[in-house]
């Protein structure tokens, strides 16, 4: 019986060694495959980097050749043109386009209203107008139209009177937003 027990113990040890060797060899092969994959990835990246460097060098050489082919007088003309364009842009940005005011007033004028006096001050973007309306309700609609215009900053109203022709006389001051006085398409 003791011999049987010893043989069983010996068999169990062999099985456990065989199982450990099998697990160890699986870990070894998995590690080996992982290392090979990492080396292949590293090699692929090295090849990609080398090809990108070659392309970068080729583009730099092409740029250098194109720079050498440029004539100095052509470069001077380009620089002069650039300065002129910059100056024109500065002038246009600072220029007041008062014609935009006329377009805005024309669009916002009610058909039963006429303006008899018009004074524009560019610095304050203010238009002082006096005019005549057919009725008080038409005048009220005219003021509402001006107040709803997105280019109008504020509307000041006053000076109600009655004219000889039985119209409603009035005075308006309209202050426009600065964007109205710039270049508009």
Image (cartoon, rainbow, N blue to C red):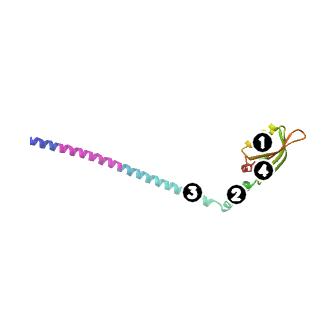
Q: CA distance from mark 2 to mark 4?
A: 30 Å
Of marks 2 and 4, the one in the foreground: 4
Query: Which residues lie in the magenta part?
Result: 12-34
Which picture quadrant has residue 108? top right
Badge 2 is on which residue? Answer: 86
As rendered, which of 10 and 69 lies closer to the eye? 10
Majority secondary structure of magenta residues: helix
Q: Callout 3 environment at 10 Å: few (<14), some (14 to 19), or many (20+)?
A: few
Q: Residue at x 20, y 43 (%)?
A: 15
Q: CA distance from mark 3 to mark 1?
A: 66 Å
Q: Which mark is residue 143?
A: 1
Q: Is residue 19 magenta?
A: yes
Quarter occupied by residue 166? top right
Mark 2 / mark 4, whichever is N-terminal: 2
Please report whichever mark, 3 or 1, sits nearer to the chain's N-terminal start: 3
Q: Is residue 114 above or below residue 52?
A: above
Q: In the rendered image, which residue does mark 4 sit on?
A: 126
């Amino acid at each position: 019986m003791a011999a049987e027990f010893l043989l069983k113990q010996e068999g169990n040890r062999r099985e456990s060694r065989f199982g450990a060797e099998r697990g160890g060899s699986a870990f070894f092969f998995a590690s080996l495959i992982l290392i090979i994959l990492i080396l292949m990835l590293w090699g692929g990246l090295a090849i990609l980097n080398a090809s990108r460097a070659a392309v970068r060098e080729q583009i730099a050489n092409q740029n250098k050749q194109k720079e050498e082919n440029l004539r100095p007088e052509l470069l001077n003309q380009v620089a002069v043109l650039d300065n002129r364009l910059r100056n024109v842009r500065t002038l246009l940005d600072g220029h007041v386009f008062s014609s935009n005011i006329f377009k805005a007033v024309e669009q916002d004028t009610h058909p039963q209203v006429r303006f008899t006096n018009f004074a524009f001050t560019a610095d304050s973007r203010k238009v002082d107008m006096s005019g005549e309306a057919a009725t008080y309700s038409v005048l009220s609609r005219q003021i509402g139209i001006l107040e709803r215009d997105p280019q109008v900053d504020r509307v000041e109203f006053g000076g109600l009177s009655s004219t000889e022709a039985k119209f409603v006389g009035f005075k308006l001051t309209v202050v426009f937003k600065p964007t109205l006085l710039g270049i508009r398409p």
